[in-house]
Amino acid sequence: MMHVLDDDLSDALDKWEELTPIYAKAKGQRIHLHDFRKSKHSALTLEAEGSTNAEREHKAYAHEDYLAVIKAYGIAAEQEVDAFWNLKLQEAKVGVWRTLQSNKRTEAKIL
Protein backbone atom coordinates (compact mmCIF):
# COMPACT_ATOMS: atom_id res chain seq x y z
CA MET A 1 0.00 0.00 0.00
CA MET A 2 1.21 3.49 -0.84
CA HIS A 3 1.98 5.76 2.09
CA VAL A 4 1.25 9.42 1.72
CA LEU A 5 2.03 11.40 4.83
CA ASP A 6 0.28 14.48 6.12
CA ASP A 7 3.52 16.32 5.31
CA ASP A 8 3.01 15.33 1.66
CA LEU A 9 -0.45 16.86 1.79
CA SER A 10 0.89 20.00 3.40
CA ASP A 11 3.62 20.28 0.76
CA ALA A 12 1.07 19.81 -2.05
CA LEU A 13 -1.21 22.48 -0.61
CA ASP A 14 1.71 24.89 -0.16
CA LYS A 15 2.80 24.29 -3.75
CA TRP A 16 -0.78 24.72 -4.94
CA GLU A 17 -0.96 28.08 -3.16
CA GLU A 18 2.40 29.09 -4.65
CA LEU A 19 1.45 28.08 -8.19
CA THR A 20 -1.98 29.71 -8.33
CA PRO A 21 -0.75 33.30 -8.81
CA ILE A 22 1.93 32.08 -11.22
CA TYR A 23 -0.76 30.41 -13.33
CA ALA A 24 -3.01 33.48 -13.13
CA LYS A 25 -0.18 35.78 -14.25
CA ALA A 26 0.84 33.45 -17.09
CA LYS A 27 -2.73 33.16 -18.32
CA GLY A 28 -3.23 36.93 -18.13
CA GLN A 29 -0.03 37.51 -20.07
CA ARG A 30 -1.03 34.99 -22.74
CA ILE A 31 -4.46 36.56 -23.15
CA HIS A 32 -2.96 40.04 -23.32
CA LEU A 33 -0.45 39.00 -25.98
CA HIS A 34 -3.14 37.17 -27.94
CA ASP A 35 -5.05 40.42 -28.32
CA PHE A 36 -1.99 42.65 -28.57
CA ARG A 37 -0.65 40.74 -31.57
CA LYS A 38 -3.76 41.77 -33.52
CA SER A 39 -3.27 45.41 -32.60
CA LYS A 40 0.43 45.23 -33.43
CA HIS A 41 -0.33 43.67 -36.81
CA SER A 42 -2.84 46.42 -37.61
CA ALA A 43 -0.41 49.17 -36.62
CA LEU A 44 2.40 47.63 -38.64
CA THR A 45 0.12 47.18 -41.64
CA LEU A 46 -0.77 50.87 -41.53
CA GLU A 47 2.91 51.84 -41.28
CA ALA A 48 4.11 49.48 -44.01
CA GLU A 49 4.84 50.71 -47.48
CA GLY A 50 3.34 48.90 -50.40
CA SER A 51 1.02 49.39 -53.32
CA THR A 52 -1.60 46.89 -52.14
CA ASN A 53 -3.12 45.99 -48.81
CA ALA A 54 -1.87 42.41 -49.23
CA GLU A 55 1.69 43.64 -49.72
CA ARG A 56 1.50 45.83 -46.59
CA GLU A 57 -0.01 42.93 -44.63
CA HIS A 58 2.81 40.59 -45.67
CA LYS A 59 5.37 43.17 -44.55
CA ALA A 60 3.57 43.54 -41.22
CA TYR A 61 3.61 39.77 -40.63
CA ALA A 62 7.33 39.67 -41.42
CA HIS A 63 8.21 42.71 -39.29
CA GLU A 64 10.61 41.99 -36.41
CA ASP A 65 8.28 43.68 -33.89
CA TYR A 66 5.41 41.39 -34.89
CA LEU A 67 7.66 38.34 -34.75
CA ALA A 68 8.79 39.38 -31.25
CA VAL A 69 5.15 39.51 -30.12
CA ILE A 70 4.52 36.06 -31.59
CA LYS A 71 7.58 34.68 -29.78
CA ALA A 72 6.46 36.25 -26.49
CA TYR A 73 2.98 34.79 -27.03
CA GLY A 74 4.50 31.33 -27.44
CA ILE A 75 6.53 31.71 -24.25
CA ALA A 76 3.47 32.94 -22.33
CA ALA A 77 1.42 29.98 -23.58
CA GLU A 78 4.18 27.59 -22.53
CA GLN A 79 4.35 29.15 -19.05
CA GLU A 80 0.57 28.96 -18.72
CA VAL A 81 0.46 25.29 -19.66
CA ASP A 82 3.38 24.46 -17.37
CA ALA A 83 1.73 26.17 -14.40
CA PHE A 84 -1.64 24.57 -15.19
CA TRP A 85 -0.24 21.05 -15.20
CA ASN A 86 1.80 21.69 -12.07
CA LEU A 87 -1.43 22.76 -10.38
CA LYS A 88 -3.14 19.61 -11.66
CA LEU A 89 -0.30 17.51 -10.23
CA GLN A 90 -0.79 19.06 -6.80
CA GLU A 91 -4.54 18.47 -7.13
CA ALA A 92 -3.87 14.81 -7.91
CA LYS A 93 -1.62 14.47 -4.86
CA VAL A 94 -4.40 15.86 -2.67
CA GLY A 95 -6.82 13.43 -4.29
CA VAL A 96 -4.53 10.48 -3.56
CA TRP A 97 -4.19 11.61 0.05
CA ARG A 98 -7.98 11.91 0.40
CA THR A 99 -8.52 8.46 -1.09
CA LEU A 100 -5.96 6.91 1.25
CA GLN A 101 -7.57 8.62 4.24
CA SER A 102 -10.96 7.28 3.19
CA ASN A 103 -9.50 3.79 2.79
CA LYS A 104 -8.01 3.99 6.29
CA ARG A 105 -11.37 4.95 7.76
CA THR A 106 -13.05 2.08 5.92
CA GLU A 107 -10.40 -0.39 7.14
CA ALA A 108 -10.83 0.87 10.71
CA LYS A 109 -14.58 0.25 10.54
CA ILE A 110 -14.05 -3.29 9.25
CA LEU A 111 -11.52 -4.19 11.94
Image (cartoon, rainbow, N blue to C red):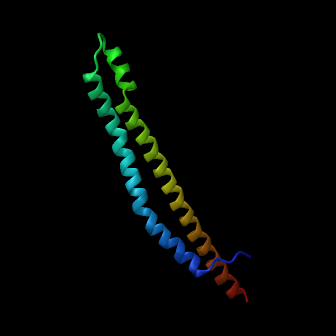
Say above or below: 51 vs 71: above
Judge by depth and name the residue closer to the eye, 12 or 101.
12
Say above or below: 20 vs 104: above
Q: Quadrant of the N terminus?
A: bottom right
Res. 8 image quadrant: bottom right
Say above or below: 78 vs 50: below
Q: In x, y percent, where is residue 35?
A: 33, 39
Q: Quadrant of the C terminus?
A: bottom right
- The residue at 41%/52% (across/down) is 26
Asked if residue 86 lies left or right of residue 54, the reply is right
- The residue at 58%/81% (across/down) is 6
Asked if residue 62 lies left or right of residue 100, the reply is left
Judge by depth and name the residue closer to the eye, 106 or 39.
39
Q: In x, y percent, where is residue 70?
A: 41, 36
Res. 65 image quadrant: top left
Say above or below: 1 vs 48: below
Asked if residue 70 lies left or right of residue 56, the reply is right
Judge by depth and name the residue closer to the eye, 98 or 11.
11
Q: In x, y percent, where is residue 59?
A: 36, 21
- The residue at 29%/33% (across/down) is 39
